[in-house]
Image: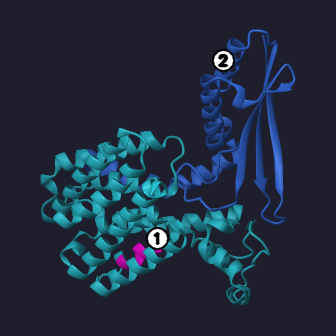
Chain colours: A blue, B cyan
Amino acid sequence: MSARAILFRTVWVLAVVWPGVQMALVHWAGVHPWRLGAYGMYSTFQRDRVEVFLDGGILNRRAESAEVTAAWTRYEETRRTLGHLASGEDALARLLFRTHPEVKEVRIESVRERLDGTTGTFAESREARSWRR
Amino acid sequence: MGWFLVHVAARYGTELIWGESWVDAIPFLGFLLLAGRWWTVSADRSRTPLLAAAALFKAAVLGWREFPTFSNHSSLEMLVLLLGALGAAEDLPLDAALKSLPGLALVWSAVQKVAYGVWIRGTFPLWLSVQRPALASAFHLLGVPIPPSHGPFVAASVWPAFLGTTALVAEAAAGAAVLVLPAQRTASAAIGALVVLLGLELVAGEWQFGLLMAGLLVLAVGDLWENRRTLVAFLAGDAMLVLWAAFSRWGAHL
């Protein structure tokens, strides 16, 4: 069998089994069920957002610079898709320390609201990480 | 072949109209090359290395743009491109691979719905059942639990889970299956599948998606372009897509 034929069949087999792997990632790593190409779109609905606290006070995204807003939004989108596999949290914290030199502590909270299929209500979960200067 | 390019140009030209950057032109050009490649496949697959490279290029650009999201339709498009590029040889089961994709989408979509429930606003028949009480009664008779308002629900059995797969992607995939899977592909079957597919997408407000799936469907069955009746259906859909896109982009300024 040629290398091309092996590659062709590998892509085909991966296409068949990948959604199962994605579902495992949803379960174990908090990946968004709609994403990563596993035909999970229009399954249960969930909302994700990232909140930032400086010295205990919540930060208003709209009042921040374009650089901070862009990094914040980028991390939020990555977190929404990849869950715990997302990177960029440390970079966002470093950026916030640099743009807010007076701040002693940065806390980033990832909030997920997921609709319960049985009750129709949102269940909220939060994960927080803190950095000290 | 010329008409095929018109269709592809309409699909990706629309993306250019909606798009905000020149990067959108890359998949457009890549897809034009791909269209030519697919046409050539039916004649002699072994003579198309350049066009296979174009398909790979298009898949790579799509992957780069979609990373890490990879929505359903983009994933399907990438798969078609990859399989098409790699399968451009007579001894590889390209047709079987392409035909397996709608079934694959249907089955995994059902599994996902069983595991997580269904977001009813994204599932057209279920959304319609909420709007139309008579349909809701019919669904109840089939054992489908219909919630009183918008929201997800967990499938109570396998059957409603499969009904739940009639989300947009599965509707389109089912339309493709109707056309692609039968050994005898007639013009009336093709037109029927397209009407069902595009009709559902029109009502659901997903023209872009419907035309994309129609495009994939045609890629799998290239000889449809030799049929004048199916051609009219595609071109009518393209014209509506372009008008819709233009109105969306510039209509507010009129």
- Label tally: 2
**Numbered tag placed on residue A95 in the rendering:** 2
**Numbered tag placed on residue B122 in the rendering:** none
- Give the answer, above or below, for where B211 lies relative to A104: below
- Give the answer, above or below, for where A72 lies relative to B213: above
Task: For mark 1, name the chain.
Answer: B
Using the numbered discs, state the Cα–Cα distance from disc 1 to disc 2 in whole angstroms. 44 Å
Q: Residues within 10 Å of mark 2 (few under 14, many from 20)?
A: some
Task: For mark 2, name the chain.
Answer: A
Task: Please state the extent of the stretch shown in magenta in the rendering.
Answer: B174-179
Decide which of B254, A30 is in the foreground and name it. B254
- Give the answer, above or below, for where B44 lies relative to B221: above
Q: Which amino acid type is marked by label 2?
A: Leu
Contact between marks 1 and 2 (CB within 8 A): the answer is no
User: Which residue is pictured at 52% across the width and 52% down the height?
Assistant: B71
Residue B188 is left or right of residue B252, and the answer is: left
Q: Examine the image and state in which quarter residue B45 appears.
A: bottom left
Tell me if I can see residue A97 in this picture. yes
User: Which residue is pictured at 70% across the width and 20% down the height?
Assistant: A93
Percent position of residue B44, x then y: 13, 60
Q: Could you tell me what secondary structure mostly forms the magenta stretch? A: helix
Tell me if I can see residue B186 in this picture. no
- For the N terminus of chain B, the quadrant is bottom left
Residue A74 is left or right of residue B235, and the answer is: right
Percent position of residue A28, x then y: 70, 44
**Between marks 1 and 2 in the image, the one whose residue lies nearer the viewer:** 2
Q: Is residue A36 magenta?
A: no
- Give the answer, above or below, for where B202 lies relative to A77: below
Residue B146 is left or right of residue B113, and the answer is: right
Element under label 1? helix
**Numbered tag placed on residue B172 in the rendering:** 1
